[in-house]
Image (cartoon, helix red, strand yellow):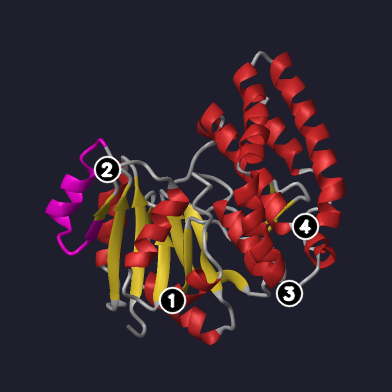
Amino acid sequence: MSNLVSIVIVNWNGEKWLKKCISSLDKQTYKSFEILLVDNNSSDSSLKLVTSLFPSVKIIKNDQNVGFARGNTIGINAAKGEFILLLNIDTWVEKDFISNLMTFYKTHDYDVISPLEQNYDGSRKKFTSITIDPFGHPVWVPYRDDFKNFYLTGVCLLFKKSLYINTRGLDENFFMYCEEVDWFWRLKLFKKSYSFASNAIVFHAGANVQSALRYEIFLWRNKNTLQMLLKNYSWYTLFWVLPLLLIQNLGEILVFLLILKPKFSYSYIQGWVFVIQSLKRVIKERTWIQKNRKISDKEILSSMYKGLGKFQHIFYFI
């Protein structure tokens, strides 16, 4: 349906966020939209709340937690709209939000756009631009209008459903973390364009540093980062990237052992073992990507951060 925006929200025990999030969508001046809530088998009262307060929301209930990437894909496959708006549950927006996003999309030549973020409480947040280092680790740099971000965060994204299908979207084998980095790397290889929309704001809570320092998160990132590199780099780049990544991982394993965090050290080993066991699948995905890529690794590397993003991560952890 032309100009219909399908808003896909993936939920897992997000009862405390949903009322404000969906209420803000109900107040939109732009009226041509539907809301699809994909629930990953929540154990709280999320669905009861949404059913009672927002009967127009279409609920898709999974019988298990399938993760963020697959949850979004399930919602997108069920969506009726030409446009897809992915939105995190820990967000809210002002009444002209969708209207502003659609205006920006239709007056610019971008395939994917994302609003700028502010703090959930409405206070101003310092805008940053985002890239990655050659080993796939995110790096935040001071915001510049002329800076070409390597990727846009998965907090809120607007794009056409056809783009998602044709580029195979978020990798469902990424349970959580790095899924948007991987997709935007692929979009970059396919010469698709994307940018922040300067006329739209999303208010986002997000995770603090301490809540992000969990064994499970390290494990997901270690699995996903390695898969991402194997899929998106040319073989000649992997010949030097993978040995250096292994050396870096060994150093980080030692650091976490020294500070008595052995589970974090173990997550690196688990990440490599997981990818080795999944190598047949990963190579199949990589073959399709490499066959359809339109730009070289030289161009990709030129758009990356020239240092090591992990130093920033380890600094925050310590």
Which label sits in the foreground, 4 or 3?
Answer: 3
Position above or below: 294 against 250: below
Residue type, mark 2 in image: Glu
The one nearer the camera, 65 or 292, is 292
Residue drawn where x is 47% and y is 76% of the image: 162
Instruction: Give the label on residue 100, or none.
Output: 1
Residue type, mark 4 in image: Met
Q: Is residue 62 left or right of residue 311?
A: left
Residue type, mark 3 in image: Lys
Identify the magenta region.
43-59
- From the image, tell me which residue sits under label 4: 304
Residue 74 percent across, percent down from the top left:
37, 58
Q: Residues within 10 Å of mark 1 (few under 14, many from 20)?
A: some
Q: Residues within 10 Å of mark 4 (few under 14, many from 20)?
A: some
Sequence-wise, the earlier of marks 1 and 4 is 1
- From the image, tell me which residue sits under label 3: 294
Distance from disc 4 to disc 3, alpha carbons, whole Å, reads 18 Å
- From the image, tell me which residue sits under label 2: 15
Quadrant housing residue 253: top right
Q: Is residue 192 left or right of residue 307?
A: left
The one nearer the camera, 139 or 188, is 188
Residue drawn where x is 81% and y is 50% of the image: 238
Position above or below: 296 against 15: below
Residue 122 falls within the magenta-colored stretch: no
Sequence-wise, the earlier of marks 2 and 4 is 2
The one nearer the camera, 218 or 127, is 218
The answer to whether the residue labelled 3 contacts the one labelled 2, judged by CB atoms less than 8 Å apart, is no
Q: Secondary structure at mark 2?
A: helix
